Amino acid sequence: MIRKMFLLFSLFSLFVLRSQEQTNQQGQTKEELQKQQRQLQKEIEELNASLVQIRKSKKQSLSQLAMVQRKIAAREQLVNNINREIRHIDDDIYNKQIEIYRLRKELDTLKLRYAQSIVFAYKNRSSYEYLNFLFSAPNFNDAIKRMMYLKSYRRYRETEAQTIAKTQDLLQQNIGTLNSTREERKQVLQNQSSQLQVLEQDKKEKDQVVRQLKDQEKDLQAQITRREKERIRLNKALDVAIRRAREEAERQAKLARQKALEEQKRLQQQAAKQPANENTAGKNNKPANNGAITSNEPTEKTVATVGGASTRSYSVFESTEDGLKKSINFENNKGRLPWPVSSGFVTDRFGTQQIPGTRLTENNDGIFIATPVGSPVKCVADGKVYVIIPLDDSYSVMVQHGKYFTIYNKLSSVSVSSGQEVNAGTVVGKAGEDFDGSGKIEFRVMVNGSNKFVDPERWLKPR
């Protein structure tokens, strides 16, 4: 008996430890993993469809490499999710085995008790013994209690029989669930094996594209040179626009300061004309500035945020209450901003990037997102369209969000106008083509209008 209790305690301890390990290490439920797998599979299918189209182009190398790399990353993530799902299934199988063992032990105990009660009832089945048990009571109340006891004992045996039947049904259900889970595990293992095989094919395709890049290094250099010229030209146009925006912001800040000083002077003159007692009562009155910054310098100023929890740098672009509000709204949504396109993936990341298989590098002030030509491009936050810059065969839209600016480049057409107030989700234009013929846009984020670009992926919500 002691050995059986020790065995049950050991199995229960293993069950608890296994459950804790499942919660701590995996985090996601099996349903969440399966949902993520469906999303990854959908993305891989979209990438395959895009690759079919781009292979028809003679200038396929750069975009094809980016798509194959993204497909490999998505498939590796898919395989990892399948591995985690297998661990979930293994845990389910283990838990079901523990439950089946417990039910069987419980069923054996119930059957033993029920058999003992049947034997006892059989040995005491005589009516004489029943009457003798009742009439041997010392008084009437005790006889009633003995009668109630016999009735409750009869109900107990009926309940025991029902419990045994329910436990048997539950045991069969768990055995059926265990068999289904084992079959599910078999199917998931087959899916894992097929995904690993396709992953190897994707890696071979990547190696082939890298060899093509090496052979086409001169053509790639021409594409990179063309993109660099466009980048420099766009930056010059942005410099002009930002300088004009800063001058306008400084002018508005100067007017706001002059207006505040004039209002203060007027109040002082009005107070000087009042009687002494009224003058004393109102000497603490101060003019409000409606949230505007009224320092004498139109440059950045570091002050405490609302509540005094931290400090931030205020710029001349926040000299109005609306500008300050849009800046703080933009900051508070860092890492949660919506993507400018509904579907697509990043082909060229922010900063200096090395092209695999070559000695070539490219500098990106933003990220390039592959998306079907003509796809709507949406604003990521509330703001105002400051300028629309026409390029050779595309457009660039710059939207101001207080001291932050977002730039939407490589648009085939524009749906907004300069000075227009826009909200998050407002369509600013349609996606155009890159130099290799693939659908693509460039998205940038600038801070304080100083051509200080930051990594846009850190501002966008994860996909």
Image (spheres, rainbow, N blue to C red):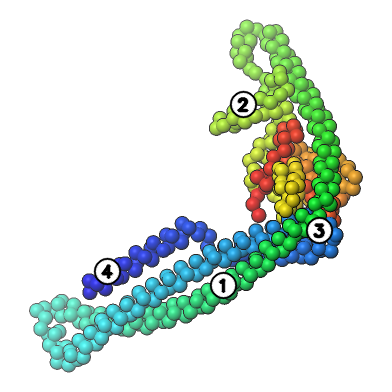
The residue that mark 1 highlights is 188
Task: Report the Cα–Cα distance between label 1 and label 4.
Answer: 36 Å
Horizontal and vertical percent position of residue 46? 73, 63
From the viewer's perspective, is the residue at label 2 or at label 3 nearer?
3
State the residue position of label 3.
60
Mark 2 lies on residue: 303
Look at 73% across and 62% down and name the residue there.
208
CA distance separating discs 2 and 4:
66 Å
- In this picture, is 185 found above or below 330? below
- Residue in the foreground of this view, choosing between 244 and 278: 244
Are discs 3 and 1 less than 8 Å apart at CB? Answer: no
> 309 left or right of 364?
left
Which secondary structure lies at badge 2? strand
Q: Earlier in the sequence, mark 1 or mark 2?
A: 1
Residue 54, percent from left and from top: 81, 61
Q: In the drawing, what numbered circle is on residue 6? A: 4
- Neighbor class of circle 3 (other Cα within 10 Å; few <14, some 14-19, many 20+) is many
- Quick one: SS at disc 4? helix
Look at 56% across and 72% down and name the residue there.
188
Asked whether residue 380 appears in the rendered view, the answer is no
* Contact between labelled residues 4 and 2, with CB atoms less than 8 Å apart: no
- CA neighbours of label 4 inside 10 A, class few (<14), some (14 to 19), many (20+): few
Measured in 3D between alpha carbons, the distance from the residue under mark 1 to the one under mark 2, in whole angstroms, is 57 Å
Identify which residue, 459 or 338, lies in the foreground. Answer: 459
Query: What is the distance, in whole Å, between disc 3 and disc 4 at their CAs?
Result: 67 Å
Q: Quadrant of residue 315?
A: top right
Disc on the earlier residue, 2 or 4: 4
